[in-house]
Image (tube, helix red, strand yellow):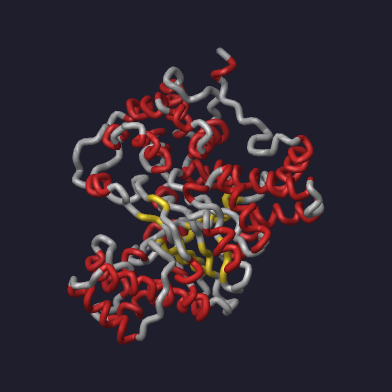
Amino acid sequence: MDETQFLNLHKDRYFSSDPDQRKIARHLYQLVENLPLICPHGHVDPLLFADNRPFPGPTELLVIPDHYLFRMLYSQGVRLEQLGIPRIDGGTTESGYRKIWQMVADFFYLFRATPTGGWMKHELHEVFGVRKRLNSETAMEIYDQLQTELQKPENLPRAMFERFNIEVLSTTDSPIDTLEQHQKIRESGWKGRIVPAFRPDNVTDFTQSNWLKNIGKLSQVSGIDCNNYKGYIAALEQRRRFFKQTGATSTDHGVLTPFTDELTAGEAEKLYEKALQGTSTPEDAKRFTGHMLMEMARMSIEDGLTMQIHPGVVRNHNPEIFRVFGADKGCDIPSATDYVHNMKPLLNKFGNDPRLTLIVFTIDETSYSRELAPLAGHYPAMKLGPAWWFHDSREGMLRYRHMTTETAGIYNTVGFNDDTRAFPSIPARHDVARRIDCRFLAELVAEHVIDIDEAEEMIVDMSFNLAKKNYKL
């Protein structure tokens, strides 16, 4: 076979080409390469581990659930129906999984120099033992190899979890979820640690689809009448307690802006009543969501759950895709943010309280050095989340470290999270993060900013300890 057809993962990938820095990075990487993975924020379905059934096939595992992958193909004119993405109305989409895989292989060149391409190569090579490049000619051979691999006991979800050396994995769950699958996992006797995370956007944001219906479900699962604001708050507090009893250590809030606003109980009650009646305005929704971030911070101080905020994303930017396929289909686009003014009410009230751990993310990179690093470098409660989503990449991670470390240090950051959709990509993502952090520290050592023994401690903290500590895992 032509050597250009071999799939190779270079041992020094992502390290600097400077020989001195590369040597240091290799040394640091050896310290963390085999550390357990802490996965505090992801979107893996707990049903995988509750049922522990073989993955159905390469396409269903690696393509259909992964919007990081299919958004690129869509940008080149491939319709989502052609990739088997389910339609909301149950309409026809491609059901030939081999045909879908062949199409992905035909277009795999699109992913050159992208994080998705790097993750996929790592998955194929390290997880499934593939030694040929994915392209039009090798597509079916690799598909058949993956089909065989996925039937092996070592590639069942629980076995894969153990093989990846995952210490703990947190899913992302709605407050109206019964957490039945988490209960099933715990009752099975399996020792793998899968925990939920409390994601209340669908009941705190009036603009969310089915908000009113979700409030009815919140009443049902909590056993508390949510027909008034007082009952609504009590129900959320009850659900947080239930999540915590089921293993949760964190909450997660995906908001358009980091706007916070402390309302009086009377003001909040009026806005809540308007929403129940279907007469609330976008401004009402903004104020109430900002108020609920304040409430969630208060609750986190009381119950100890780490609080995450993911602002600055215009969700479902493409209305046609949202109408046909629903949310989370690769149409979420970064937007400019203002943390200094928007978060001032929350930070002034709760930011000085060390009982609160508030992790703030962004995909508006312009805010790193201007706003977020200075804020995290001052308020005891605030920590800076890692490079996220579009910047979960070689260049994005390097920019993140360069733009934040001098102001916030690394101990006001929280390590790495993988935000994965496709479960087998978890070790690939963590490997990239560890290699980039080794590269960053190697540069500091080579330029005599820090000493090698300091870098040795820092890389272990960046790869493992900071995530475990700040997510209370």
Does residue 125 sit above or below 459 in this rendering?
above
Query: Looking at the image, can residue 37 be seen?
Result: yes
Q: Quadrant of residue 214?
A: bottom left
Front in this rendered view, residue 455 or 58: 455
How many numbered marks appear? 0
Q: Residue at x 47, y 71 (%)?
A: 341
Please state the horizontal and vertical placement of residue 455, each as a whole percent of the image. 76, 53
Q: Residue at x 45, y 33 (%)?
A: 151
Q: Quadrant of residue 223?
A: bottom left
Does residue 257 sit above or below 435 in this rendering?
below
Front in this rendered view, residue 97 or 286: 286
Please state the horizontal and vertical placement of residue 206, each as a whole percent of the image. 28, 68
Please state the horizontal and vertical placement of residue 103, each as a whole percent of the image. 36, 26
Which quarter of the image is occupied by the N terminus?
top right
Q: Residue at x 31, y 83 (%)?
A: 267
Query: Looking at the image, can residue 241 be seen?
Result: no
Front in this rendered view, residue 147 or 454: 454
Farthest residue toward the top? 1
Please state the horizontal and vertical placement of residue 339, each as a whole percent of the image. 49, 66
Which quarter of the image is occupied by the C terminus?
bottom right
